[in-house]
């Protein structure tokens, strides 16, 4: 293929520790020399993308850079026999959008080991409504339901109006679980539509949580934010309960003691969607395209073009986004 130009969101360090984002022309020949070239049709906005786009060196080490940890599109060229030109594929996580040019550009070139063929039951657009947030939600639900059944009691979902939280709530409700949500937003209409039974305001949830252990309330917890909220959730989990942890937007620190673990046998399970094994990844994607595809999925997102993403990056960093933000790169 000739040195085709395409549109991409380029983040540049204009002076020390000051970064600017702009949609510019990029060139295919400047992409990494990997095995599969993909024309990106859709991407989605995640918190990690916002960090990369604003110069967080813990996410992206070198600039200029194109963020976007999610991409769905069509194979343009492949050096691997099992991945054919014209196939519809998904790439999420690994190093995409971190130190490898990501889905906020119309083309990516990635290792074949990162590529997932589009599952039956999903369109490219639907796959990016899920995206990394959906993969993370699916992994969290999968871990929880191995032990916890609907009759065991309520499931708490924190950060419930965000991407992972809202998708988790939709899956759990579909599977017959009674979901209680914690949210810092005043508008909880999205959660009502996702089947959430009860919504607790974040400030209310954090009242009187300084005790070493709290009244047991939750059969299980899916936490997306970390920090004091995760600590309070663990302290109020019932005997034998399961708590999953996948985010740190509130804080990476966990102010907790050992009592919930040694007195109630609570289990804390970490969720890492970035480098999860391909076998498990494929299993979750198959579920997202079939058994876990809830009815409200296609009303949970806002679709934008690439030139609108900068405003949404500012909003997600302020905690102002609800549901999913889908980028249409066509």
Image (tube, rainbow, N blue to C red):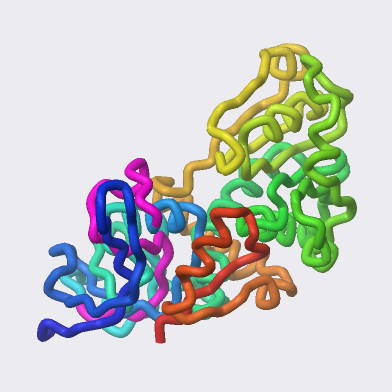
Question: Picture quarter containing residue 29?
Answer: bottom left
Report the magenta residues as a range. 54-77
Give the quadrant of residue 236: top right
Quarter of the image that includes the N terminus: bottom left
Who is closer to the viewer here, 53 or 256?
53
Compared with 214, 251 (above or below) is: below
Given the current orientation, which residue lies at the most extreme front position? 15
Instruction: Note whether 103 is above or below 271 in the view shown.
Output: below
Relative to 58, 193 lies left or right: right
| In the rendered image, the vertical position of residue 14 relative to residue 249, given as above or below | below
| Residue for point 61% across, 39% down | 250
Residue 81 visible to the viewer: yes
Q: In this view, does 20 lie above or below 89?
A: above
Can residue 100 be seen by looking at this rendering?
A: no
Residue displayed at 31% across by 62% down: 11
Q: Where is residue 37 in the image (x, y as percent from the top left)?
A: 23, 73
Residue 322, percent from left and from top: 67, 63
Image location (x, y in percent) of residue 326: 53, 73
The percent position of residue 34, horizontal first and vertical second, equals: 17, 63
Q: Is the magenta stretch mostly helix, strand or loop?
A: loop
Observer-nearest of 224 and 120: 224
- How many numbered circles does the render carry? 0
State which quarter of the image contains the C terminus: bottom left
- The residue shown at (44%, 77%) is 42
Is residue 55 part of the magenta span, yes or no?
A: yes
Tell which of 63 and 293 is nearer to you.
Answer: 63
Q: Is residue 62 magenta?
A: yes
Where is residue 28, by image quadrant? bottom left
């Amino acid at each position: 293929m000739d040195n085709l130009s395409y549109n991409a969101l380029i983040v540049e360090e204009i002076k020390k520790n000051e970064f600017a984002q702009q949609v510019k022309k990029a060139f295919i020949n400047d992409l990494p020399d990997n095995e599969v070239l993909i024309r990106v049709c859709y991407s989605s906005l995640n918190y990690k993308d916002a960090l990369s786009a604003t110069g967080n060196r813990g996410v992206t080490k070198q600039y200029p850079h194109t963020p976007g940890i999610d991409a769905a599109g069509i194979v343009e060229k492949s050096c691997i026999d099992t991945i054919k030109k014209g196939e519809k594929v998904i790439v999420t996580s690994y190093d995409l959008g971190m130190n490898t040019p990501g889905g906020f550009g119309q083309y990516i070139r990635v290792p074949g080991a990162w590529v997932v063929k589009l599952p039956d039951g999903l369109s490219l657009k639907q796959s990016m409504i899920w995206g990394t947030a959906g993969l993370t939600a699916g992994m969290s639900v999968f871990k929880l339901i191995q032990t916890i059944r609907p009759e065991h009691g309520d499931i708490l979902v924190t950060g419930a109006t965000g991407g992972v939280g809202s998708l988790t709530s939709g899956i759990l409700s579909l599977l017959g679980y009674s979901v209680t949500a914690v949210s810092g937003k005043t508008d909880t209409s999205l959660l009502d539509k996702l089947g959430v039974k009860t919504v607790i305001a974040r400030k209310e949830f954090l009242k009187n949580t300084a005790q070493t252990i709290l009244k047991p309330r939750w059969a299980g917890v899916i936490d997306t934010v970390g920090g004091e909220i995760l600590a309070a959730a663990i302290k109020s989990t019932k005997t034998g309960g399961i708590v999953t942890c996948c985010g740190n937007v509130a804080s990476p620190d966990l102010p907790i003691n050992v009592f919930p673990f040694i007195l109630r046998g609570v289990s804390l399970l970490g969720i890492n969607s970035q480098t999860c094994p391909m076998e498990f990844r494929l299993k979750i994607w198959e579920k997202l395209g079939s058994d876990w595809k809830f009815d409200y999925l296609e009303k949970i997102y806002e679709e934008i073009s690439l030139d609108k993403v900068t405003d949404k990056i500012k909003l997600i960093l302020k905690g102002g986004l609800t549901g999913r933000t889908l980028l249409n790169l066509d």
